[in-house]
Image (spheres, coloured by chain):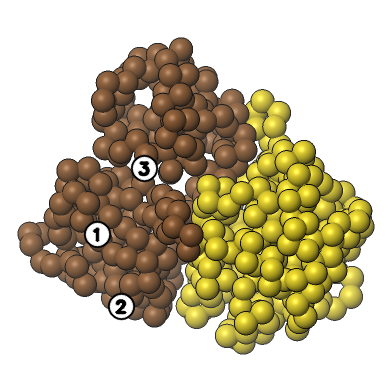
Chain colours: A yellow, B brown
Amino acid sequence: MHAQPSSPPPLHFIEQSLFSANPDAWRRLSPSIRRREYKRDEPVFSNGDAAHSLIFVCSGWVRLSRQTPDGQETVSGLCAPGDIFGEAALFPHASYPNDAQVIGDRAELAFIPASELQAVIRHDSAFSAGILALLNERVAQAQLRLEHASTLSSAQRLGCFLLRLCRTEAKNEAVLRIPVEKHVLASYLGMKPETLSRSFQQLKSTGIAVSGASVTVASIEKLQQYVCGSCSKSGHCDSEQLRE
Amino acid sequence: MHAQPSSPPPLHFIEQSLFSANPDAWRRLSPSIRRREYKRDEPVFSNGDAAHSLIFVCSGWVRLSRQTPDGQETVSGLCAPGDIFGEAALFPHASYPNDAQVIGDRAELAFIPASELQAVIRHDSAFSAGILALLNERVAQAQLRLEHASTLSSAQRLGCFLLRLCRTEAKNEAVLRIPVEKHVLASYLGMKPETLSRSFQQLKSTGIAVSGASVTVASIEKLQQYVCGSCSKSGHCDSEQLRE
């Protein structure tokens, strides 16, 4: 187990994300939450490790990836603050199906031990329903990404990723820091690194300016117009609704 | 609600797929299962309809699709006999997130009403755990398809689909009937129809012969060698293990 006690966990943040409708489950699980700081490139777990914990990203970024037998690596997930990963911990005797590694300068992660979690799921049907909804949301996200691979151009897929980063912005413009190396972001978006560079160029017309890892979005609305008309979730997406 | 009582549902088949470890849930739900026959192209439900039932494919095929605002259609699922769809019915007040339509000549579907299903999930934690596992499998499938979009060539993706169709074959060769129109299969596999034709050509070297909707796989093993080395699930996939 990687997690070690350090200081009290960021209770409020985790409580809001999964436990807001389940105060009983929160009372039972919060004392066992442990958090830990990680440095850049530090592994969190490896593909095949016993799934010891459900993990919350308190700060920083984590990438989830897998290797094929012929040596290709694919990035299946980029987890930002507020995201949850390691859902294999919901199931008895499960192992993680991918590698998890910290990207960016540092990250702080919080761990809910699998055994305690599974015990609460077994006995608290309201919490169990919340976990069902979490997994359902995962299915929806993965299916939307699959759909985007067909219906969105590379530049639109990049635009959709930038809109996700804009979600916490209250204004119509945003300055974003992309903590992910270009080749990792390209793999996550299902394109070659050179296609990613070309996609950034194409987004200039919508008011996107790139300088190193910093991206300025001059008009979130304009970016939405460029991206969201090609997405079947249009009208029902967090990234859109913030601006309405 | 489309489902109407006709003759007794194919109990054994459904019981095995989701209820094998949950005889109590089966006893409570099986009396409310209704089945119905559908003709070619008949709609099962539309995107946005209230999710009235979890649905089992007893025979035939169903395609799940969505439309984007700019008029593109993507096929997100092709459900074969034994598959389950309409998982939105697991959640109170949910609506289906896609269109479902019968393809092929006919299909027989069985419906478990959402209200009864949700009541059993709330009170039967063992069954609830089975539903969790079902959704987790959905996440894994969608993530694997996403990964395949990056790591597998078009011909390998088609080969993977054919291997799935071979899963019930006991021999090393198989004659398959693809009940899906070529443009639907192409959309499902995330490629253009002309790429699908080219992919069938490329698979000839592995012993694939196509004649109309009929596909002969001369050597499942050879097809696996062509496909599975580029897949991170290699060694842990149903389509492989059948031949070992």
| Mark 1 or mark 3: whose residue is earlier in sequence | 1
* Type of the residue with mark 2: Ser
Tell me the element at label 3: helix
> Tag on residue B184?
3
Secondary-structure class at tag 2? helix
Residue sitting at x 57%, y 71%: A237
- State left or right for residue A102 relative to residue B172: right
Q: Amino acid at mark 1?
A: Pro
Q: Are marks 1 and 3 on the same chain?
A: yes
Residue A207 on image: x %, y %? 78, 63
Circle 3 residues within 10 Å: few <14, some 14–19, many ≥20: some
Q: Quadrant of residue A72?
A: top right
Against A151, is A48 above or below?
Answer: above
* Res B42 seen here: yes
- Name the residue that disc number 2 marks: B115
Q: Mark 3: which amino acid?
A: Val
Q: Nearer the viewer, residue A85 or B165?
A: B165
Say above or below: A152 vs A132. above
Q: Are the numbered discs 2 and 1 placed on the same chain, yes or no?
A: yes
Frontmost residue, B218 versus A182: A182
- Most extreme residue toward the front, as rendered? A205
3 or 2: tag closer to the N-terminus: 2
- Which residue position is annotated with label 1? B43
Q: Chain of mark 3?
A: B
